[in-house]
Amino acid sequence: MSDEHHHDSTSAGCCATETDHDVIVVGGGVAGLSAALMLGRSRRRTLVLDAGRPRNRFAAHMQAVLGSDGKTPWDLLATGIEELRAYDVEVRRAQVTAVATDDRTVTVHTAEGDRITARALVAASGVSDQLPDVPGLSQRWGRSVLHCPYCHGWEVRDRALGVVFTSPLARHQVPLVRQLSADVTAFFGGFDDGTGSAAAPVELTAELRQRLQAREVKIVTEPVVALHGEGGDLSEVELSTGARVPVEAIFTGAELREQAAYLDGLELRRAQSPFGEFLEVDPMGHTSNPRIFATGNLTVPTGNVPMSLGAAAMTGAGVNHFLAEEDFDDAQQPDRFWENRYGASAQSWSGNPNAALVAEAGDRAPGSSLDLGCGEGADVIWLAGKGWQATGVDISTIAVDRARKAAAAAGVADRTAFSAVDLRTFDPGRQFDLVTASFLHSPVDLPRTEILRRAIGWVAPGGRLLVISHQPGEHHRHHLDLPTVDAEVTALDLPDEAWSIRKQVIPRTVTRPDGTEIEHCDGIVEFSRRAGTSSGT
């Protein structure tokens, strides 16, 4: 509510409910930041929650990333975070522990004790690489123990290289590694951490042996039990027989595990892949839950940096499209429209009572009042301050909540009552000395005349219905049906023997934010019920 009008807006707000953010992105790696960039540029209120453990943190450099080839992963992330600031995207260190959803909201809980709400969530927390407990293996991960020939192959070209089989996919790695070096050994026995070989069964058929030998790939069938070398370098691979094979770098696959236990309670659909079972998503990253999206290595576990960047950018666009369509759907529903309208800002109106109401009711003896479409409650609070027992109703729960808080702050909570109701079906079940409808206009469905006809029955004998409205004019083109004061009177068609009617049009000068002044015309119609008449007349 403002001193100009209550419900007078041409646009829906940015959110359908009063959430902390439009979107929460879980994971601040390249996928999470890429999705957040698309969302920030789409003016979505976006929060990134990051635990600070990206999958590629073990790598000293990134390769095959156009424009960033050779940079460290941390440099890319720092640049991304800096770029997000331009779009008001917040990146916060936090560990997400649980996520819940309802039909309108996503609620996120963190290990730090926070409870954060949003309209949608992007899961971009990635996977972790679980390695066998083989001496010398984990400390060399990302340096001389590698998983991707495209990501790290150039840096170890022409060296003595090995491919350790941990799954059938390793047979497809061998030709890629052979392209990098003429000295390649295929370790078919996989790793043995003392509990038995961790290798997936790969049959070394005569055909496969012949294929490898044709490219001079050496074949070893004994399991690898230890790696040796100085620091993070690798010089030898120790076999279960005690023999050692000179190797300077090995390529192998780890067991991939999702870092998404926080999603467990949502029962999202999953899909089987050669690397295990992962979240099922559509091309835009949408999961089986309408408010949950997923991207990056959570959905494509083998995706490198540029693949994750591209997929996440598509997911960010997908989330924005989902929310934009929802905004349009909501705009057609009165309750959602006004929740949007009030949820878009911390305060919609000035907090001052309408000038026309002050002029009309300022010198009247107080009684009981009802304000239809009370907004944030300024008129109700003003009447209560004058001694009225004032009631306000509005379709927006956000507006009503603000009205209650404002009444308490003004010290009139005991003389006010607020309710969130739909005026299309509302019935107070009693009569009032004053019923007000100030600027009761709406761009969406509002059977205004029907509401006012019913409001006639809520006026006590000797009481008044005061209707204050914008009059048709150049500055209110966006209202398709603004009634004149004459039309207002004609529409209600009240009998003269029961009602006296006073109408007037008052010009008013309004100063715009840019300092220019325009003239509005307000229409005021006062319907006064004659004493001794019944509610049916």
Image: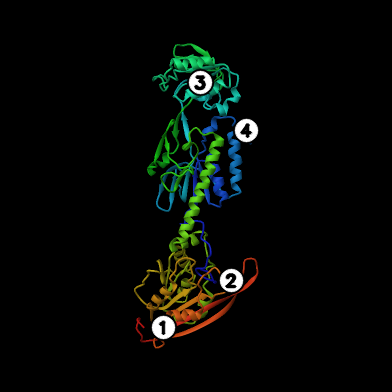
Q: Which mark is residue 475?
A: 2
User: Which mark sits nearer the N-terminus, 1 or 2?
Assistant: 2
Closer to us: 403 or 522: 522
Gap in Å between the C-alphas at discs 2 and 3?
74 Å
Q: Residue at x 65, y 68 (%)?
A: 515
Closer to us: 348 or 526: 526
Gap in Å between the C-alphas at discs 4 and 1?
79 Å
Q: Where is residue 306 in the image (x, y as percent from the top left)?
A: 56, 36
Q: Which residue is drawn at 64% across and 72% down?
A: 517
User: Which mark sits nearer the N-terminus, 4 or 1?
Assistant: 4
Local crowd size for mark 1, using a 10 Å CA cut-off: few (<14), some (14–19), many (≥20):
some
Cβ–Cβ under 8 Å for marks 1 and 3: no
User: Which mark sits nearer the N-terminus, 1 or 3?
Assistant: 3
Gap in Å between the C-alphas at discs 4 and 2?
56 Å
Considering the numbered disc 4 on the image, is that residue within a helix, a strand or a loop? loop
Question: Mark 4 highlights which residue?
Answer: 69
Q: Position of residue 173 (x, y in %)?
A: 51, 24
Q: What amino acid is labelled 2 in the image?
A: His
In this rendering, the answer to whether 239 lies above or below 474 is above
Considering the numbered disc 2 on the image, is that residue within a helix, a strand or a loop? helix
State whether residue 95 appears in this view: yes
- Quadrant location of the C terminus? bottom left
